[in-house]
Image: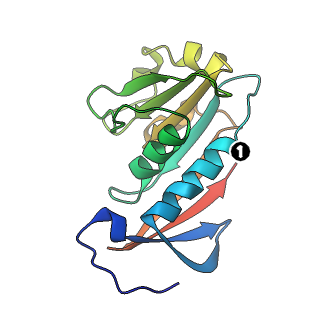
């Protein structure tokens, strides 16, 4: 899908979607990118422990937009922003598979131990938690093998790619 677009607003951005390193021949508008996040959110299910989703990518690659879209899909009505200075923000859910979304921004963390003091073990032991982590590279020692990884790549002003891994 090719469109002539004004890239001055986010609503006009186009996103490319990559599945398992295979690009589909389609470009996605921001609305379609948000629908992809919604689809992903509703495909998740309760496990023995919390569901952890690691959001990888450079600044501006789409991590926060994806997290915001997942949160909206799950019924969070308050503004969702990266908790860069708070490190983590908890949102309660009602009538969903999960009871809480915990949004973590590990950008400012120097080591995994800094997240451990914020009750990481307790958070991950609760199967009703959905944990979204931006900048997971800073806490790789804490990520369990079952962590879902999403990789976002900035292609140009109006294009992003997404790839998924377990």
Q: Residue at x 47, y 50 (%)?
A: 66
26 or 136: nearer the eye? 26
Compared across the picture, whether 152 is left or right of 130 comes to left
Q: How many marks?
A: 1
Q: Is residue 97 visible?
A: yes
Compared across the picture, whether 126 is left or right of 6 comes to right
Q: Residue furthest right?
A: 48
Q: Residue at x 71, y 44 (%)?
A: 43
Q: Position of residue 35 (x, y in %)?
A: 56, 56
Q: Position of residue 7 (x, y in %)?
A: 28, 74
Give residue 135's quadrant in the image.
Answer: top left
Q: Residue at x 64, y 28 (%)?
A: 96
Give residue 5's quadrant in the image.
Answer: bottom left
- Label 1: which residue? 43
Image height of 55 relative to 52, above or below? below
Compared across the picture, whether 6 is left or right of 15 comes to left
Q: Residue furthest left?
A: 8
Please, which colouring scheme is shown? rainbow
Which type of secondary structure does the marked residue at label 1 adopt? helix
25 or 108: nearer the eye? 25
Q: Give neighbour class at mark 1: few <14, some 14-19, many 20+ (Cα, 10 Å).
A: few
Image height of 70 relative to 128, above or below? below
Q: Position of residue 160 (x, y in %)?
A: 45, 68
Q: Position of residue 102 (x, y in %)?
A: 49, 27
Q: Is residue 137 visible?
A: no
Compared across the picture, whether 12 is left or right of 69 comes to left
Image height of 4 relative to 158, above or below? below
Q: Residue at x 39, y 22 (%)?
A: 114
9 or 166: nearer the eye? 9
């Amino acid at each position: 899908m090719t469109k002539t677009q004004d890239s001055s607003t986010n609503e006009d951005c186009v996103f490319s979607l990559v599945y398992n390193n295979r690009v589909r021949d389609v470009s996605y508008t921001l609305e379609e990118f948000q629908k992809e996040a919604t689809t992903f959110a509703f495909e998740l299910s309760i496990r023995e422990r919390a569901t952890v989703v690691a959001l990888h990518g450079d600044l501006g690659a789409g991590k926060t937009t994806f997290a915001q879209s997942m949160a909206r899909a799950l019924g969070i009505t308050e503004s969702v922003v990266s908790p860069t200075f708070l490190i983590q923000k908890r949102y309660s859910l009602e009538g969903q598979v999960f009871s809480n979304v915990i949004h973590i921004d590990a950008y400012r963390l120097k080591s995994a131990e800094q997240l451990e003091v914020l009750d990481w073990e307790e958070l991950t032991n609760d199967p009703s938690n959905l944990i979204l982590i931006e900048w997971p590279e800073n806490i790789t020692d804490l990520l369990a093998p079952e962590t879902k990884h999403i990789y976002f790549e900035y292609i140009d002003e109006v294009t992003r790619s997404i790839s998924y891994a377990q």
